[in-house]
Image (cartoon, grey):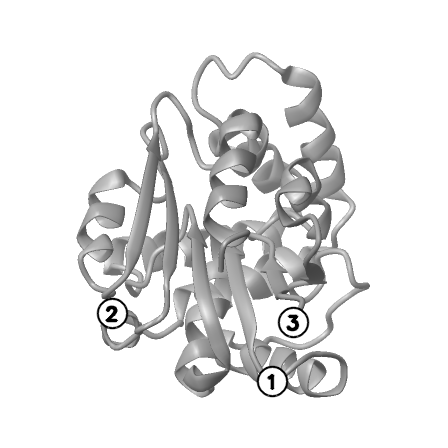
């Protein structure tokens, strides 16, 4: 049976962020899901991580098999965890790429609220130009890629950025969900990732029964661009035998 890989991108990006490494899923069926407002048209109403997960399952009911392999980058990983909480028996494996299961701290909630207010007052421009470069490790050196991603990020509406920040701020903790998971888990962390520190990744790596964790030295939050060849190889080695 052909495996179905479901890939969910991160906040501020779209499904194309997976393209540098999609060769790792050769021979599999890949389904690229879009977070609201990021690459799938505009978004007019606030939403929750739980509501996105429910919508994604409803779409897979029409277009997908009974079980899938979920992979999420950053905010996409938050959605994956909620999807597992909602329908655990439909998940054959989990990939958390620069993502974690913990709820926001009070300080992080305040930071996200500040981002929302800044966009309300002045639009998304300065937020996009701050957030996207900050996700790469210092000295990444390929300014053209970062610039292109900033340009792409500016093409998404203010609502996409505001509602996404709100949904992340208010999401549930899924530590227990991960602890109860019995399928293989694949995790990727960046040594220089300031959005999801390696300490968090190491803590959650002990939760599932069957886990593979890769910590890439000198890498920030964007392994698909910062460490493409190694990341694609590790994905291939994990998913092809499943």
Q: Are marks 1 and 3 in contact (CB under 8 Å)?
A: no
Question: Residue 34: which quarter of the image?
Answer: bottom right
Q: Which residue is mark 2?
A: 175
Residue at 75% from the left image edge and 40% from the top image edge: 152
Q: Are marks 2 and 3 in contact (CB under 8 Å)?
A: no
Of mark 1 and mark 2, the one earlier in the sequence is 1
Residue at 30% from the left image edge and 73% from the top image edge: 182
**In the rendered image of this protein, does residue 69 appear above or below residue 50?**
above
Of mark 2 and mark 3, the one earlier in the sequence is 3
Single out the mark in the foreground, 1 or 2.
1
**Labelled disc at residue 44:** none
Residue 48, horizontal then vertical, whole percent: 52, 77
**Labelled disc at residue 1:** 3
Of mark 1 and mark 3, the one earlier in the sequence is 3
Does residue 159 appear in this view?
no
Residue 28, horizontal then vertical, whole percent: 68, 58
**Number of other residues with Cα within 10 Å of mark 1, as a class: few under 14, some 14 to 19, many 20 or more:** few
State the residue in front, 75 or 32. Answer: 32
State the residue in front, 187 or 75. Answer: 187
Left or right: residue 7 compared with residue 87: right
């Amino acid at each position: 049976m052909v495996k179905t890989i479901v890939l969910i991108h991160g906040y501020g990006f779209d499904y194309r962020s997976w393209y540098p490494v999609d060769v790792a899923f050769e021979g599999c069926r890949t389904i690229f899901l879009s977070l609201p407002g990021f690459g799938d048209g505009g978004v007019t109403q606030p939403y929750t991580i739980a509501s996105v997960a429910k919508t994604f399952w409803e779409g897979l009911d029409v277009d997908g098999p009974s079980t899938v392999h979920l992979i999420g980058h950053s905010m996409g990983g938050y959605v994956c965890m909620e999807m597992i909480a909602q329908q655990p028996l439909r998940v054959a494996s989990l990939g958390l790429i620069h993502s974690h299961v913990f709820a926001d701290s009070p300080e992080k909630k305040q930071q996200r609220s500040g981002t929302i207010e800044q966009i309300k007052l002045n639009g998304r421009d300065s937020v996009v130009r701050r957030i996207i470069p900050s996700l790469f490790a210092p000295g990444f050196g390929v300014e053209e890629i970062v610039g292109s991603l900033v340009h792409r990020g500016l093409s998404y509406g203010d609502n996409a950025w505001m509602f996404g920040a709100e949904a992340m701020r208010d999401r549930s903790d899924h530590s227990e969900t991960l602890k109860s998971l019995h399928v293989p888990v694949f995790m990727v962390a960046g040594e220089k990732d300031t959005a999801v520190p390696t300490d968090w990744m190491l803590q959650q790596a002990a939760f599932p029964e069957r886990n593979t964790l890769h910590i890439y030295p000198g890498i920030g939050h964007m392994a698909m661009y910062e460490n493409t060849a190694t990341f694609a190889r590790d994905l291939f080695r994990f998913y092809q035998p499943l």
